[in-house]
Image (tube, rainbow, N blue to C red):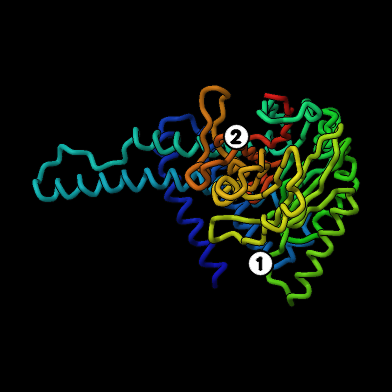
Amino acid sequence: MRLFFWIVAILLFDWYVFQAFRIIIHGWTAPLKTAVQILYWLAPLITIAFLVSGNFSDTSTWNKNVFVFLRTFVFIVYFSKFLIAGVLLIDDFRRLLTWGYQALSADNRFDAGRSKFLSQVALFLGSVPFLSLTYGLLRNPYRYTVFREKLALKNLPEALSGLRIIQISDIHSGSFTFKEPVREAIALINQLKPDLVFFTGDLVNNKADEMDDFMDVFDKIEARLGVYSIFGNHDYGDYVQWPSEKHKQDNLDKLKSIHRSLGWNLLTNENRMLEVNGAKLAVIGVENYSTHLRFPKYGDLKIATQGTEGADLKLLLSHDPSHWNGQVLTDYKDIAITFSGHTHGMQFGIEVPGYIKWSPIQYVYKQWAGMYQSGDQYLYVNRGLGFLGYPGRVGILPEITCLDLTKG
């Protein structure tokens, strides 16, 4: 009965939205009308077939790429249609008021028919997300972009001038639909010849075994002074219903072993003191720490910084950028640079360097992409290498950060 209800609801909704198309194609030639009608009704038919198949078969056996693209196609189509429906509702309200006026005044000069103009507005609004989200799905999920920054630090020892740090974040390996483009990202990282590589959390969506097919990809990262990593909020398995607490802990233990197998130095509220040309460099890593209540606080910066008192430069890896305002700026003024991720730039926004930088995520996170400064302290928020939910990006491209330090 539930499935039947959804099928009826889909058909009624699509019939309602089709009214905008019907107004626009009125007067077109018969072949064009037929083509539009076939293309339009193809979407609900695919959606219904998808629902029926998912209801009577095990979707885990489906080809992952087919499943992901079908699911995303349905989302894009109906997100766009909801915008169209919204304008049609405004038009129907206008028509209701017109009908009421006619009924009360006995004046038939007003036309209570649908507005062609509002139908055009509806289709235009619907076409914007349809075209942009489709483009973002087909073109941008693996369109890796190197964001280069040169940062002059006042008290940087001469021995650390020229240090090159590559940062990646939010891999979300369980979301990848293709493997070869990810290899190209690793090749791009190695071409930059980093001294240090930082990974700032969310290696998986939920489960450690999402990395099984990508071990031979990410173990190819090369850095002169090593690769250092931390956990993000998704790495703990908090968003999965586990059979027991032991299953959850086993998953986390496996993820820790994966970091080791990759040759990465996983920092769980700890640090590594490195000597570089006689200078002491502290790489500090905390577990997830967020000032937002919906995300966990596993991080302990007090423990993580123990033993770093004599460092000439302190660098912090902390997944959630809200940690910077929440604790780093107030209590740890000797941490020069914090590296974060988490936001993905919402995978949606507008960026024109030097002119505009906007994403809806900025209304949730004050620092959401790129470099930020407060006094002598800096925060860099990486836009993420992978994706989550929507398997694409619109305006906010997947990022490899290349940060060169110089003496200010």
Q: Where residue 104 appears, x then y in whole percent?
A: 10, 50
Q: Which residue lies furthest to the left in this view?
A: 105
Residues at marks 1 and 2, CA–CA distance in whole angstroms? 57 Å
* Image quarter of the C terminus: top right
SS category of the residue bearing label 2: loop
Q: How crowded is mark 2: few (under 14 residues within 10 Å), some or many (20 or more)?
A: some
Residue with the mark numbered 1:
55
Q: Where residue 187 appears, x then y in whole percent?
A: 85, 33
Marks 1 and 2: CB-CB under 8 Å?
Answer: no
Tag nearer the camera, 1 or 2: 2
Q: Where residue 250 appears, x then y in whole percent?
A: 81, 69
Numbered label attached to residue 376? 2
Numbered label attached to residue 76? none
In the image: residue 58, left or right of residue 8: right
Q: Is residue 217 above or below residue 350?
A: below
Residue at 34% x, 48% y is 89
Q: Residue furthest front?
A: 310
Residue type indicated by callout 2: Asp
Q: Where residue 154 appears, x then y in whole percent?
A: 66, 28
Q: How crowded is mark 1: few (under 14 residues within 10 Å), some or many (20 or more)?
A: few
| Nearest to the observer: residue 2 or residue 18 | 2
